[in-house]
Every structure is written in C-alpha cells, then in structure tokens.
Amino acid sequence: MAHAVDPIKIGVDGPFTGGSSSMGVSMRDGVRLATAEINKSGGVLGRQIVLAERDDEAKNERGVQIAQELINKEKVVAVVGYINTGVALASQRFFQEAKIPVFNNVATGTVVTKQFDDQPDNYVFRNAA
C-alpha cells in the first residue's frame, strides 16, 4: 500500500547506446527535465517522481528483459519510452498483462496501438511528435 510520502516510480526504456541512441538519449533527457520540474514544484499530489532508466540497445530481446525487470523488480506504475517499433511490440505485452500504462514516444508503427485491440482495456499509448 502506497503512502503519501512514497515516490511514484516510472520506467524509462529506450536505446541510450547504439544506432538509435540519439533519439533515445534525447527522449530520456526530456523525461529527466520534466521530472525535475515536476518534483521541484512539489511532485504529483505531494509525491516525488523517481525514474528507473534502462537501455534497451534497440534490441527486442533486451526490451523484453527490461519490461520484466521494471514490472517485477522495480514495481513501476507507468513506462515512458520505446523508440523502436520492434522493441515496443516485443515488450509492451508484459505491461499490458500487468495493466501498467506504456507511453511510446517515438515508435510510430501503427500496429503499436492496435496490438491489443481484441482486449477490453488497452494500456498502450503512442505520442508521435
């Protein structure tokens, strides 16, 4: 059970190394900046945001490992990230099953948001800037 003083843990998953790293690093840095601004102004309902950052290296299998770690070990309440459509498609099913929202920032494949159309609730969102 969360108490008002417990931080809100959010996962950040993207390629911070490798070929897609320029997009992953800029996404991560934007998340860090927004988190710092939110926390400086008192957080969310008095709770600070804490980030659990992971480098998926633009590899589907690494994304799957990270998804399971963020859910089972880090106990995140939401995830921001996914630069590569393939990594998103391989990984986000674990968040869907755990009913944890995923906000895709760059992965633009239309199938990203249609992967769970056959289910009553969809926890996958896409923000294609």
Image (cartoon, rainbow, N blue to C red):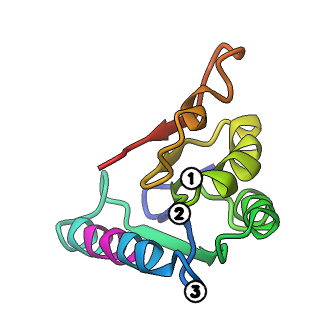
The residue sitting at 66% across, 13% down in the picture is 120
Residue appearing at x 35%, y 76% in the figure? 26
Q: Amino acid at mark 2?
A: Lys
Give the image location of residue 27, x and y in percent.
Answer: 38, 69
Disc 3 crowd, CA 10 A, few/some/many (<14, 14-19, 20+):
some
From which residue to which does the magenta span run?
A: 28-35
Reading the image, the residue beneath label 1 is 2
Compare marks 3 and 1 and give the one earlier in the sequence.
1
Disc 3 vs disc 1: which is toward the camera?
3
Label 3 vs label 1: CA separation? 34 Å
Q: Which residue is mark 3?
A: 17
In reply to whether residue 33 is colored magenta, the answer given is yes
- Expressed as whole percent of the image width and height from the top left, the position of residue 90 reads 76, 50
Residue 3: image location, x then y, percent: 51, 55
Q: Which amino acid type is shown beneath numbered disc 1?
A: Ala
Question: Does residue 120 lie above or below 40 as drawn?
Answer: above
Camera-near label (2 vs 3) is 3
- Classify 97 as above or below 52: above
Q: Earlier in the sequence, mark 1 or mark 2?
A: 1
| Residue sitting at the far bottom | 17
Q: What secondary structure is the stretch in magenta mostly built from? A: helix
User: Quick check: 125 above or below 59?
Assistant: above
Going by the numbered disc 3, the residue's amino acid type is Thr
